[in-house]
Image (cartoon, helix red, strand yellow):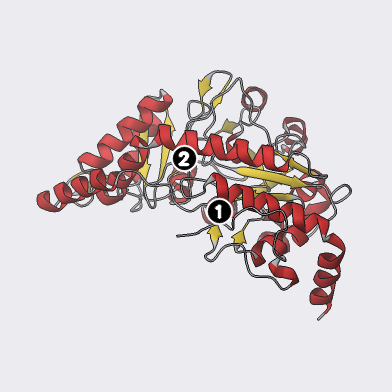
Amino acid sequence: MVAAKSTTTERPALAILGGKPAFAEPLHVGRPNVGNYGAFQERVADMWDRRWLTNAGRYVEEFEQRVAALIGVKHCVATCNATAAIEIVVHALGLKGEVILPSFTFVAAANALQWQGVTPTFCDIEADNFNLDPERVASMITPRTTAIFPAHIFGRPADIEALTRLAADRGLTVFFDAAHALGCSYQGEMIGRFGRAEILSFHATKFINSMEGGAVVTNDDDLAHRLRLMKNFGFTSYDRTDEIGINGKMTEVCAAMGLTSFEAMPEIVEINRRNWGAYRDGLKKLPGISLIEYSTAEQHNYHYVIVEVDSQQAPLNRDELLLTLHRENVLARRYFWPGCHRMAPYASLYPNAGSCLPQTERVAGRVLALPTGQTITLEIIETICEIISAAFSYAGRIRSLSLTQAQS
């Protein structure tokens, strides 16, 4: 069990300066939230007794129904993971040519397109919410463009109205990456109800998890039917296939975990909201540190605590602060550094992409995700904020040490 150091008027030396780490065990970003273990055990025992482990069992069907009901859509098609969900959607929609998406997102989105023989075309983001800039999207549409694939980064919705209108005007398909956005809303409607489809992730690091898992949510009856066939090898009956399909099914044990996690949703939201507020209060007086805000007019899961480090105002830059936190066993993350366009194979395919993505590069160089979730207490958050404050106080020594290490 991770225990925070008690608050004192004179904090012991930072670990980067020779002190003892504040935490005995690493604090991870994205440590899984879990529900009631007894409820999970009951589902696993039932599954065990019935010998039904996969292939659209009762827990997968119940999980799909719970997700669809939460969002208010007709169909939820559960999959083994969100990457497979993207690939199946791309294939079911018959997308070819180029698809426009942000570079400031998890690389699986681009990889899923590339894997299907579709060219990912990276577009810049808006400075204030880190989502696709509709004006930049409009300027990047070519005769080869077939779709727009925005993401709701950190659960804050993309400009759905503008992007949907743009897609309609240009005869393009629009579908959304909602991996961060379960339980979030846009103009009072739950995310998951927009475009041809939206993709959800239930990976272990997500707000609600099924260990591994994903889903496609849609109101399109025909699309949902094709997705169900394609995630099960294309089978239309016991020994007949009418589609080219893959094995993209969610297993019963994953669905059992998903249902158990779902039951804990109110508690998890409240913990996330509490933690976000504690970070806000603990960091608000520090120069050059800003915590991203969530609109009070919408619903949010508060799953991500994201700070921007402005190196023009803060005593340390983002990477110097990251190193300091890591030495204290606070394993903060640089989401989504350095951007998909700087990862293989895209860095070789588009070597000059950075010049067209100024906001992406700026944001990627200053964003930091801090630990939150069920395992993070207010005492832990207080200590993390103290570490950041102390790091700023010793910025000169830390910067000199960082430069020495970089040169060695």
Compare residues 122 and 107 and report the one nearer the observer: 107
Which residue lies at the image location 72% right of the left edge and 39% below the top edge? Answer: 142
Compare residues 341 and 252 and report the one nearer the observer: 252
Which residue lies at the image location 38% right of the left edge and 47% below the top edge? Answer: 34
From what the image shows, is residue 404 above or below residue 355?
Answer: below
Which circle's residue, 1 or 2, is located before the other in the chain?
A: 1
Compare residues 392 and 47 and report the one nearer the observer: 392
Residue 297: image x %, image y %?
Answer: 61, 19
Q: Is residue 56 left or right of residue 135?
A: left
Q: Is residue 184 left or right of residue 215?
A: right
- In the rendered image, which residue does mark 2 sit on? 200
Which quadrant: the C terminus? bottom right
Which quadrant: the N terminus? bottom left
Q: Is residue 210 left or right of residue 50?
A: right
Q: Amino acid at mark 2?
A: Leu
**Label 1, residues with CA under 10 Å away: few <14, some 14-19, many ≥20:** some
Q: Residue furthest left?
A: 49
Counting the numbered discs, the total is: 2
Q: Secondary structure at mark 1?
A: loop
Which residue lies at the image location 72% right of the left edge and 66% below the top edge? Answer: 13
Q: Is residue 239 left or right of residue 84?
A: left
Q: Residue furthest bottom?
A: 408
Q: Is residue 50 visible?
A: yes
Q: Which mark is residue 294?
A: none
Q: Amino acid at mark 1?
A: Val
Q: Residue furthest front?
A: 9
Q: Which mark is residue 29?
A: 1
Residue 99 placement: quadrant: top right
Q: Nearer the viewer, mark 1 or mark 2?
A: 1
From what the image shows, is residue 110 above or below residue 23?
Answer: above
